[in-house]
Image (cartoon, rainbow, N blue to C red):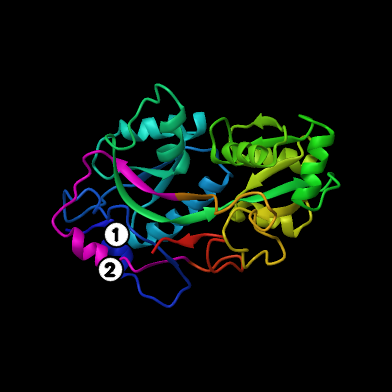
Amino acid sequence: MTRILAKVCAYGSGLSALAVSTMMVVPLAAVADSYPVKPIKLIVPFPAGGPTDLSARLLAQLLSPRLAQQIVIDNRPGASGAIGAKVAAMAAPDGYTLLFCNSPTHSVNPAIIPNLGYDPDEDFTPIVRFGTVPLILTVGSHLPVRSIADLVGRAKTEPSRVRYGSAGVASFTHIAGELLAQQTNIKLLHVPYKGLAPAITDAIGGHIDMVFVTPLEGLPHISAGRLRALAVTSARRLVTLPEVPTMAESGVMDGELLTWGGLCGPHGVSLGDSQEAERGCLGRLPFPKREGRSRAPGLRGSG
């Protein structure tokens, strides 16, 4: 039977590639040799224009030509991804409704949100995890700080006056801000948004002071001088920002803080009988070169 991942694997090499690994490689909707026969809906549980949305759209651009079907992005933001995830969990397990899942939907939310409305283990079948992404601690160019030490000093001088934005309560960027405050013994004022894009806009406009961003969404603003990067949450410096230290180098935390992204289907999406063969062919997932970018910035393959 024709399956979505088999078609991806069959695509020729020669383009810059993004390593992937499986949570559990699952052939989607193995119900007919002709799958897919209609457009596939990909639920993105965050607003349009944010890092999750951008990643999902890159994925859709990759898969659509190989499936000969349109992949329709359906943004369902709210509750740190919980609203969209619940919609996906309730969909028919036929392979025509998928979820772009990530750390908030499947790791963070279940731990801190009561009455979530879905069970990440029982209500979903994981398909593939694409990799992990660090965050970048940035401040608006209006703020006269150039290091974490400067930021901590300002926050201690003016407790609860340094405002940081996040993609929403319980979002990964919210957790990163609280961890920074805890590790440095400072008080920050949390300003939650419905997604990361509006938080970045307000940081650039001076309405808030700092925001943790993903490389995919933050690098253009950092390069243009609209945001100033203070540190990255990965264990090593980013190739795209070699002058920016890690949080550990800045004396804030040991280890690293990474988010992940992948595809999930509603519970019951068929595993079929060729799971091992499909796992073996998933060495690399090619991303098209576009806008001078050969791969998703900052994304580390999981394999």
Between disc 2 and disc 1, the foreground one is 2
Question: x and y percent of residue 249 in the render?
Answer: 67, 58
In the rendered image, which residue does mark 1 sit on? 5
Would residue 203 appear left or right of 65 to someone viewing this image?
right
Question: In the image, is residue 126 part of the stretch drawn in magenta?
Answer: no
Give the residue type that dot 1 points to. Answer: Leu
Q: Write down the region rendered in magenta.
A: 261-287
Q: Quadrant of residue 199?
A: top right
In the rendered image, which residue does mark 2 sit on? 281
Would residue 205 appear left or right of 234 to someone viewing this image?
right
Would residue 170 appear left or right of 107 to someone viewing this image?
right
Quadrant into which the C terminus falls: bottom left
Residue 54 in the image: above or below residue 287: above
Q: Are marks 2 and 1 in contact (CB under 8 Å)?
A: yes
Q: Quadrant of residue 241?
A: bottom right
Quadrant into which the N terminus falls: bottom left
Question: x and y percent of residue 243 in the render?
Answer: 72, 65
**How dense is the environment of label 1, judged by Cα within 10 Å: few (below 14), some, or many (20 and up)?**
many
Question: In the image, is residue 262 part of the stretch drawn in magenta?
Answer: yes
Residues at marks 2 and 1, CA–CA distance in whole angstroms: 9 Å
- SS for callout 1: helix
Which residue does the image show at 57% across and 38% down from the upper left?
A: 175
